[in-house]
């Protein structure tokens, strides 16, 4: 029945966009039609992916990729803009989950691996990827007319983006598989900390790049602004988390709706002010979980109840935003970038994890949790394209092409890692 309903919706959507103006010229009607296709098609694609031993997220992504404006056109770019509130809502729920799973006792227990792996990823991956790409671009010029300075800037920015991962993919698969254990806890902790560091690192490298290309001193004011934004967002999130924990403890009614309301409020606040949505929700989840431990179970259960349908739309929208045509044009440098980044992630995870005393599963399979890339990488690419004309456009296009591969391969690898480590389906502590 669901397959029949999806076929009818998809056929009507395609016909309306090809033959008629009523739906196309009605933005709300068009967006609702796209939403119906993404929800029903996403659920079916997720179930289909499971039959082939792939994570549901891969099914959502592929469905979005096929239905998006770069393929069948069941969803248009204007629809994506109208459906953007789902993105803010999903990212808020993902960040709340991340904060809620980030327990103080885990930090204390994993402090050494967390510090070692975060340092190795932040600096090791950047240096390894930038160096390897520098050699490759000398042999096979990616930018034939680029000056040596522009080539340095390009490989440095690509090295920074290589450090970035997809927290949304990491957390969504942990929730889907109900995964718990040393490897999952370590990968999640490193992912969260890297999310904070990457903003500072990107701002610093961008400032140095602008200085190298145009002369003058780096604009350190931008770095100070990012630090203030991070600290302020964490403080705002801590207040939200304390209020949420108090509400769950004292009232304990309609908790799933309350969690959704908090995520929406944070997204709207981020639109209207300088705070960072992900950091606000991450801090709120952390405070609610750790300041009110008696309410932790109800809080995380509410997140699970609220998140599944939102995740379907969110990952389908990510898939719709991926342009497979960019990869078709830049497949060689993109493939080299993906392979070099993958090798860097493997090297900077296994050896440092072993040196830090991590368990066998983290040493052997942990690197698979750092492959996926999505929203953060695309956002950084858009900033590069906007702020560094010329070389920035080529770098952004290469990043988009690489994200297409990493976001399709990453969830599959991360699921394999969790299953190989035997950390799926464990009870929450």
Image: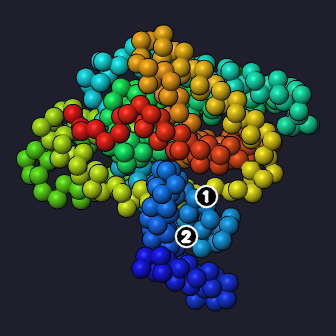
In the image: residue 87, left or right of residue 288:
right
Q: Nearer the viewer, mark 2 or mark 1?
A: 1
Q: Out of 144 and 273, give the one closest to the viewer.
A: 144
Residue 334 visible: yes
Location of the C terminus by quadrant is top left
73 up-or-down from 339: above or below: below
Tag of residue 389: none
Label 1 crowd bin: few (<14), some (14–19), many (20+), radius 10 Å: many
Give the residue drawn at x 7%, y 47%: 250
Label ID, residue 321: 1
Q: Is residue 418 left or right of residue 108?
A: right
Asked whether 277 or 222 is in front, the reply is 277
The location of residue 364, given as percent across then percent down, is 50, 24
Q: Name which of mark 2 and mark 1 comes first in the sequence.
A: 2
- Position above or below: 165 against 355: below
Q: Nearer the viewer, residue 236 or 194?
A: 194
Q: Which residue is mark 2?
A: 79
Q: Quadrant of residue 21?
A: bottom right
Q: Residue 408: x and y, percent?
A: 59, 48
Residue 288, percent across and down?
22, 39
> Mark 1 falls on what kind of element?
helix
Relative height, residue 138 to residue 15 (above, below): above
> Rounded to the nearest whole Å, what is the CA distance between mark 2 and mark 1?
11 Å
How many callouts does the rendering have?
A: 2
**Mark 2 surroundings within 10 Å by alpha-carbon count, few (fewer than 14), some (14 through 19), many (20 or more):** many
Relative vertical location of residue 95 with respect to residue 253 in this rendering, above or below: above
Residue at x 75%, y 53% (from the top left corner): 326
Q: Quadrant of the N terminus?
A: bottom left
Tell me: 269 left or right of 288: right
Q: Position of residue 161 (x, y in %)?
A: 63, 34
Left or right: 157 as drawn, with respect to 50: right
């Amino acid at each position: 029945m669901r397959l029949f309903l999806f076929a009818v919706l998809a056929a009507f959507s395609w016909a309306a966009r090809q033959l008629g103006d009523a739906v196309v010229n009605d933005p709300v009607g068009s967006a609702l039609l796209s939403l119906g296709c993404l929800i029903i098609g996403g659920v079916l694609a997720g179930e289909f992916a499971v039959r082939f031993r792939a994570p549901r997220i891969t099914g959502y992504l592929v469905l979005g990729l096929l239905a998006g404006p770069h393929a069948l056109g069941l969803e248009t770019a204007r629809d994506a803009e109208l459906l953007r509130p789902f993105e803010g809502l999903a990212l808020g729920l993902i960040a709340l989950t991340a904060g809620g799973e980030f327990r103080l006792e885990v930090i204390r227990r994993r402090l050494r691996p967390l510090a070692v792996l975060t340092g190795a990823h932040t600096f090791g991956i950047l240096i390894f990827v930038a160096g390897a790409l520098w050699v490759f671009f000398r042999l096979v010029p990616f930018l034939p007319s680029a000056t040596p300075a522009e080539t340095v800037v390009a490989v440095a920015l690509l090295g920074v983006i290589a450090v970035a991962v997809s927290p949304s993919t990491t957390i969504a698969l942990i929730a889907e598989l109900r995964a718990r254990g040393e490897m999952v806890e370590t990968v999640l902790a490193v992912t969260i900390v890297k999310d904070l560091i990457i903003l500072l690192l990107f701002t610093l490298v961008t400032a140095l790049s602008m200085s190298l290309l145009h002369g003058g001193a780096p604009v350190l004011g931008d770095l100070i602004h990012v630090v203030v934004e991070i600290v302020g967002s964490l403080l705002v999130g801590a207040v939200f988390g304390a209020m949420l924990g108090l509400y769950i403890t004292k009232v304990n009614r309609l908790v799933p709706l309350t969690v959704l309301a908090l995520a929406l409020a944070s997204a709207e606040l981020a639109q209207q002010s300088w705070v960072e949505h992900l950091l606000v929700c991450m801090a709120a989840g952390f405070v609610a979980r750790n300041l009110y431990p008696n309410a932790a179970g109800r809080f995380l259960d509410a997140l699970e109840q609220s998140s599944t349908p939102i995740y379907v739309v969110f990952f389908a929208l990510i898939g719709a935003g991926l342009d497979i045509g960019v990869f078709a044009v830049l497949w060689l440098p993109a493939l080299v970038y993906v392979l070099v980044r993958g090798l860097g992630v493997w090297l900077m995870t296994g050896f440092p994890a072993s040196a830090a005393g991590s368990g066998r599963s983290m040493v052997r399979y942990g690197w698979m949790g750092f492959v996926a890339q999505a929203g953060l990488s695309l956002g950084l690419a858009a900033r590069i394209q906007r702020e560094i004309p010329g070389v920035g456009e080529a770098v952004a296009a290469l990043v988009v092409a690489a994200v297409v591969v990493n976001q399709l391969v990453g969830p599959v690898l991360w699921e394999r890692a969790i299953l190989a480590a035997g950390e799926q389906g464990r009870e929450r502590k």
